[in-house]
Amino acid sequence: MSDVGLERFVLGVDLDGVVADYPGGFAPYAAQATGVQVEDLVARSSYNFDEWGLDKETYEELHKFAVVEDRLLSKLPVIDGCAEALWRLSDLGVWIRVITHRLYVNWGHAETVTDTVNWLDEHQIPYRDICFLGNKPEVGADCYIDDAPHNVEALRAHDCYVITYDQSYNAELDPPRARNWVEAEQLIFDRYVEWSGPRGVEVPLPGLEREDTARIARNRAHLV
């Protein structure tokens, strides 16, 4: 069910590859297993790590160790600018809904959920609710941002507005596309203005160059 009728603009935000740098965090584990340099792995070109020399079974074992034993999801690098951009959008009234498919395997759910929420708090990523599911069209957001080609294609097949967060493995996808969070913020804001229509947006988008980290810390406490 869409949230449009509730008079709020819902932004569906993917985590890995959009907010969290999962490839960068997972690469050292794969490098140790394959003997390939980390920087060579990070330069991969496909979504499924095909160039990394990992078969499905090896990848799942490494991923399980990284997530359950080494708590990878608690220490992933954060993608530059996402927290500041999302706070500015939240200040405007955008309802931020995190959507992630991190529970796609039948183990480590407790660690995955706990580390995901703690990571979001640690990096001061604002959100109103969070969904752990793979079928993203079911969420009913007014705008999505995602990096995975299959997710973008599935959402667009359901006539959803999706911004592709630029990665090496999604270059074939049509616009709208954001190369960074400055561009993503502007695209989301433009969509929000279009959605608002006669209701209007009461406050203008603050300068994209401004980084008020003290304000971020203050406003974080206001989220439910």
Image (cartoon, rainbow, N blue to C red):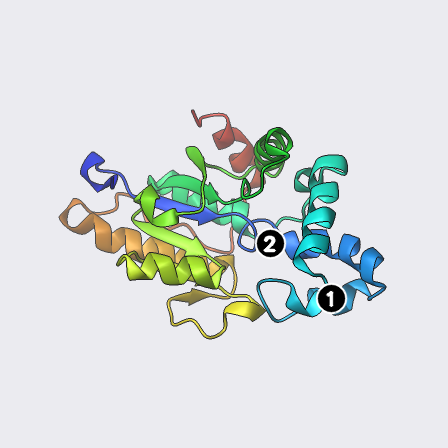
Side of 10 where 113 appears, left or right: right
Amino acid bearing label 2: Asp
Residue 72 picture quarter:
top right
Q: Is residue 71 above or below residue 223?
A: below
Outermost residue toward the bottom in this view: 172
* Residue 207 coordinates in the image, percent (x, y): 44, 54
Please name whichever residue, 21 or 50, is drawn nearer the observer in this view of the structure.
Answer: 50
Labels 1, 2: front one: 1
Count of numbered circles in the view:
2
Q: Nearer the viewer, residue 8 or 117?
A: 117
Residue located 44% across and 61% down the image: 150
Which part of the image, by quadrant, shows the C terminus? top left
Report the side of 23 relative to 65 (left or right): left
Q: How far from the left and from the top, in percent, is residue 47?
A: 57, 63
Q: Considering only vertical position in the picture, is 7 above or below 155? A: above
* SS class, disc 2: loop
| Residue 37: quarter of image | bottom right
Q: Which residue is mark 2?
A: 80
Q: Label 1: how many residues lie within 10 Å, few (<14), some (14-19) or many (20+)?
A: some
Q: Amino acid at mark 1?
A: Gly
Numbered badge on residue 176:
none
Which residue extends farthest front? 57
Residue 8 in picture, x, y percent from top left: 26, 38
Quarter of the image with the N terminus is top left
Q: Secondary structure at mark 1?
A: loop
Tell me whether the residue at label 1 lies in contact with that at label 2, contact meaning CB atoms closer than 8 angstroms. Answer: no
Residue bearing the label numbered 1: 53
Marks 1 and 2, how far apart in space?
A: 28 Å
Q: Please name the residue shown 36% across and 55% down the image.
A: 188
Report the front residue among 138 and 12. 138
| Label 2 CA crowd tier, 10 Å (few <14, some 14–19, many 20+) | some
